[in-house]
Image: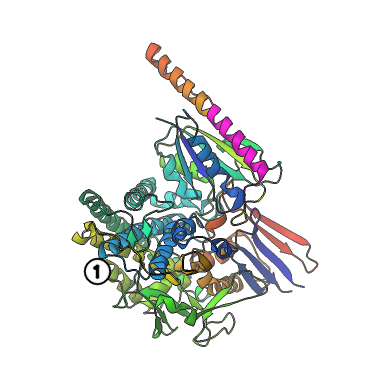
Amino acid sequence: MTRKITVDPITRLEGHGKIDIFLNDKGNVDRAYFQVPELRGFEKFAEGRPAEDMPQITSRICGVCPTAHHMAATKALDDLYKVDPPPAAKKIRELVYSTFYAEDHALHFFFLGGPDFVVGPTAPKAERNILGVLGKVGIEVGKKVIGFRKEMRELITLAAGKVIHPVFGLPGGVSKSLCAEDQRKFITGGDHAVEFAKFCLNVFNDVVLKNKQYVETILSDVYTHKTYYMGTVDPHNKVNFYDGDLRVVAPDGTEFLKFKSGDYLKHIAEHVEPWSYIKFCYLKDIGWKGFEDGPQSGVYAVAPLARLNAADGMATPEAQAAYELFYSTLGGRPVHCTLANHWARLIELLYAAERMKELAGDPEIIDPKVRNIPKKIPVEGVGVVEAPRGTLFHHYQTDARGVIEKANLIVATQNNAARIAMSVDKAARGVIKDGKVDDGILNLVEVAFRAYDPCHGCATHTLPGQMPLVVRVFDSHKKIVSEIRRQ
Amino acid sequence: MKPLVLCLGNELLGDDGAGMLVARKLKATQGHGSDIIETSLSGLSLIEYFIGYKQAIIVDAIHTGNHPPGTVIELYPDQLRSVIAPSPHYAGLPEMLELAKSLDVEFPEDIAIFAIEVADPYTIGGAIDSRVEKGIDEAVIKIKARLKRWQSLTFRTAARKKIDGNPGTVAR
């Protein structure tokens, strides 16, 4: 008899992920499936609209990472009109983007990763939340997080107009230059961000790395997959969030591919499975061989751990030191432990902060020339950035007036979908034994996908605004034999 | 200090944009006397908006299936289920209020929620349902009435305080 366990959000079936776990007669996992929602219909929606509207429209796709969509769309417009922004414009864009990264990664660490690691993956359900995190690290830390995010968001507003829906990206540049006063504020903000990032790394060190059990969990085989990794790198193969080439490393850490963003369709393809409506990205150069680890399988990962694995280092000194410590502690590059994403995210937070400081201190950033006017007839453009959750592709084809005829978006979670599915399956097999399924065990399965921070932000607004979960256990006649509600 | 009117939603997703439309209609009216913010953020990312305000109204779409589309439902935070969300992306208002309380930040003492029952908050590019449009108009009227009531209570409280030093209470 096969039993079916479903971890399923009950409010918005189209907008959220769910986990189906099938048990065999002995109560062990036969197969577990994680279904992530796909952003369906957006490409169609974009058709017939002026490409210039895309930075504004696409930033409204998602309430979690609007700045990433805005930036990818803006870069796609640069490519569409074959216009190169002036240096100051590029620097302002990257400055805003680094600031966005700092606030986004900080939120993740304390609010999402924190409950799993600061509080602990097997802690009682009622404590695995931000309040539990604050219980461990202190209320003052909570105030610090809120204050830090507020400062970062005010800086983004200063340069980009709106935090939620930035309005500053234009083909060929940005809409507004920075003045000396703005620059001073960013320099101060950069100092605060560096200090905050170091503080977060200290918290991680004290609470997670000094806890033997947590380190064993991070390193355990249950949460390990040896796949390819992809991320954007600068000309020195250092991590870059805003621009560069895409680099793919093999499971043994050697460079497998390096390509320009415009060539992504030559290297990335999508596989369809009957049980999921998301398409699973894989490396075309290898081919789809199923949900498998190893060099023979085209499965790859994106997001913080993948970015660090795909690069030779960080471009700023303190982040580089943190990067070296990361790999020396975890046994060298690449690290295949999914849960190391939480640590990698903090190293990226430090890099974003240092990069903010560098850019803000650059005299050229207040150069008033921030736009080159597009003059070419548009045909096709691709824009790629590293969103906090992984590589984000925007690709538009237009008529000669710049009206979109075809749009293609690949969001971070799609890139990661195959590996997330593998992680959930492996974690379920690892932790569910002899039919014992309780809240703590299911949380250990969820830990596997939370490390990727899969984002379903496009559909989370209706009240009460949270994602209730229900865990249902079915017998072979599809009769519910037990149910756990998570709300 | 003006009250905050925080309007939530995603205008790309059909009826999910109801809150946004309330914001725009409210802005177009005279004398609303509030700070109106539209946002498609969700969960704990919203907390910063509230800090520093004494009174706040939240406007959002709600999809319960228990009311005809367009029904305007007035709620108070304590009426929402106390939920500990598994992710900050989905963290709800109860958790946010709990967090604000524990952090002891300056958070609104009076929060009212106006939720508009919607028909289809899922379709990208979908138009607003005509019944929901009526609900939007009704919500604007109700929100204005609430703002006016708060305004007069604040005025009376301030006046009483001036006369006899009694700060009084601000009712819902």
Can residue A123 be spotted in the picture?
A: yes
- A368 and B116: which is toward the camera: A368
Q: Is residue B139 magenta?
A: yes
| Chain of the residue displaying label 1 | A
Q: Is residue A289 left or right of residue B5?
A: right
Q: Residue A176, relative to residue A38: is it above or below?
A: above
**In the image, what residue type sits under mark 1?**
Pro
Residue A126 placement (x, y as % from top left): 55, 51
Residue A432 placement (x, y as % from top left): 62, 69
- A116 and A151: which is toward the camera: A151
Q: Secondary structure at mark 1?
A: helix
Q: Residue at label 1? A: A317
Q: Residue A176, relative to residue A262: is it above or below?
A: above
Locate the N terminus of chain A and report the quarter of the image it occupies: bottom right
Q: Quadrant of residue A234?
A: bottom left
Instruction: Specify the farthest residue to the left.
Output: A363
Instruction: Specify the farthest residue to the top.
Output: B163
Residue A141 placement (x, y as % from top left): 36, 49
State the residue at coordinates (42%, 65%). A72
Q: Tell me which secondary structure the magenta stretch mostly adopts.
A: helix
Instruction: Specify the farthest residue to the right.
Output: A477
Colour scheme: rainbow
Residue A317 placement (x, y as % from top left): 24, 69
Q: Is residue A88 left or right of residue A391?
A: left
Quick one: label 1, few (<14), some, or many (20+) residues within 10 Å? few
Q: Is residue A258 left or right of residue A183?
A: right
State the residue at coordinates (42%, 74%). A306
Q: Which residues are magenta?
A: B128-145
Q: Is residue B154 magenta?
A: no
